[in-house]
């Protein structure tokens, strides 16, 4: 398939003609990859079953893993979501447009292809200007999972999407770096106490400030519990190399472990990488050290995580050691993605 690539200008905008073309490709059943403030998405007309099937094919995604429906106009929410609760309405008022996806009971207008057969549908109104304009131009809601090949880290840069999807979609919009770099928070609002199915930049604390008690799917705190969100059960975000998280209350122990174990592997001829906070980069004596950001700037760490995991792949690193980035707020999301990428391969030192 021929893939059109268009790039946003320095202000992050796309010209009108490109937006109109993207919208028309989607409305007519094609696929367009586009940036949002979280990660890039691969979009199709959400009310066209044949178009949705193409998404699953392009990504190599299991068909029981449901997609998020993206809207740009709040007035069309009631066409797709039933029983919008007072709490959901409050969250919409505060966080939409933005990186919050909510799971509602679905109406009959939502094709079961998009929900993997579930009676619920996940809906998000992104705030990225290009995403909003494309949905507006398409004049239909857009089904869009992250624009990566299934199992790879989500794309946070235009070149990630081109690497994964060139030749598999009709159009790729390169909007540069995405702002947040972690996928949206997914919140089930079909129950009395809303439940976080996937942590993201809209944190538990932020949600509770608006609606009172919010729970976590038990899988997020303890991976031995099966997840309620179908997508969370698949091996995700996995780099090709073997990733290990080094955990300790004493930072010097982490540095020492990485230097000693890394050297052993390098002596055997392996390529070894490390993911470390900025201040520790100079203390690590192995070859491929990636600084992920300041230890206290979790937004920065979140926005660089997937880029670094992908870079390790591009360099064909065999073994990757990572610091732990623990804390509250967005670090819950960071550690959720990092733990999954590592397949819960964590060592305490
Ligand atoms: O930031 C994002 O959310 C990005 C951008 C493109 O919007 N999209 C994204 O989509 O990450 P995807 O398909 O990679 O992840 C969607 C997640 C999956 O874990 C899926 O299982 C869950 O949302 N999900 C979708 N519909 C659901 C439903 N009805 N019930 C429970 N979980 C659902
Ligand atoms: Mg995904």
Image (tube, rainbow, N blue to C red):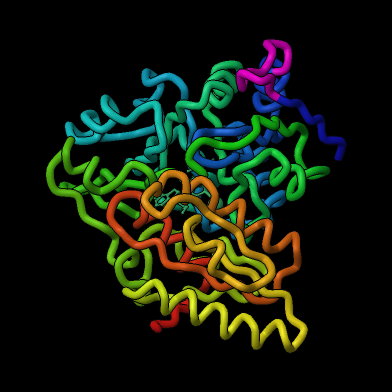
19 to the left or right of 230: right
At a point 50% along the width and 34% down the height, the residue shown is 37
Front residue of this view, candidates 81 and 186: 186
Q: Say if residue 28 shows up in the picture.
A: yes
Residue 251 location, x and y as percent? Answer: 39, 72
Q: Nearer the viewer, residue 280 or 24?
A: 280
Quarter of the image with the C terminus is bottom left
Q: Is residue 332 magenta?
A: no
Q: Main secondary structure of the magenta part?
A: loop
Q: Residue 135 lies in what quarter of the image?
A: top right
Q: Residue at x 56, y 63 (%)?
A: 282
User: Magenta segment: does it hold 9?
Assistant: yes
The x, y position of residue 149, in whole percent, is: 67, 54
- In x, y percent, where is residue 292? 53, 54
Q: Could you tell me if residue 198 is visible in this image?
A: no
Q: Position of residue 23 (x, y in %)?
A: 65, 21
**Which span of residues is magenta-colored?**
8-18
Report whether 160 appears left or right of 282: right
As rendered, which of 24 and 202 lies closer to the eye? 202
Q: Is residue 61 above or below residue 26?
A: below
């Amino acid at each position: 398939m021929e893939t059109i690539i268009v790039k946003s200008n320095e202000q992050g905008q796309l010209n009108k003609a490109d937006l109109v073309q993207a919208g028309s490709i989607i409305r007519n059943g094609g696929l367009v990859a586009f940036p949002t403030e979280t990660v890039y998405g691969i979009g199709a007309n959400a009310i066209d079953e044949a178009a949705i099937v193409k998404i699953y094919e392009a990504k190599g995604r299991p068909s029981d893993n449901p997609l998020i429906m993206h809207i740009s106009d709040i007035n069309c929410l009631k066409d797709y979501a039933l029983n919008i609760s007072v709490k959901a309405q409050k969250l919409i008022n505060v966080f939409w447009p933005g990186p919050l996806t909510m799971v509602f009971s679905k109406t009959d207008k939502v094709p079961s292809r998009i929900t993997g057969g579930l009676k619920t549908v996940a809906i998000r109104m992104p705030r990225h200007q290009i995403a909003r304009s494309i949905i507006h131009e398409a004049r239909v809601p857009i089904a869009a999972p992250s624009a990566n090949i299934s199992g790879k880290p989500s794309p946070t840069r235009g070149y990630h999407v081109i690497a994964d999807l060139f030749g598999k979609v009709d159009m790729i919009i390169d909007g540069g770096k995405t702002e947040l770099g972690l996928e949206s928070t997914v919140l089930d609002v079909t129950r009395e106490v809303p439940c976080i199915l996937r942590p993201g930049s809209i944190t538990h604390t932020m949600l509770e400030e608006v609606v009172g008690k919010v729970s976590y799917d038990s899988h997020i705190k303890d991976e031995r519990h099966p997840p309620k969100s179908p997508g969370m059960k698949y091996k995700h975000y996995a780099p090709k190399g073997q990733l290990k998280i080094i955990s300790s209350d004493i930072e010097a122990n982490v540095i020492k472990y990485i230097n000693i174990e890394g050297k052993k592997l390098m002596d055997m001829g392996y390529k070894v990488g490390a993911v470390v906070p900025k201040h520790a980069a100079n203390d690590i004596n192995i070859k491929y050290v990636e600084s992920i950001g300041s230890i206290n700037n979790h937004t920065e760490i979140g926005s660089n995580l997937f880029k670094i995991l992908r870079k390790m792949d591009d360099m064909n690193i065999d073994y990757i050691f990572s610091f732990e980035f623990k804390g509250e707020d967005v670090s819950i999301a960071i550690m959720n993605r990092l733990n999954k990428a590592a397949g819960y391969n964590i060592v305490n030192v």
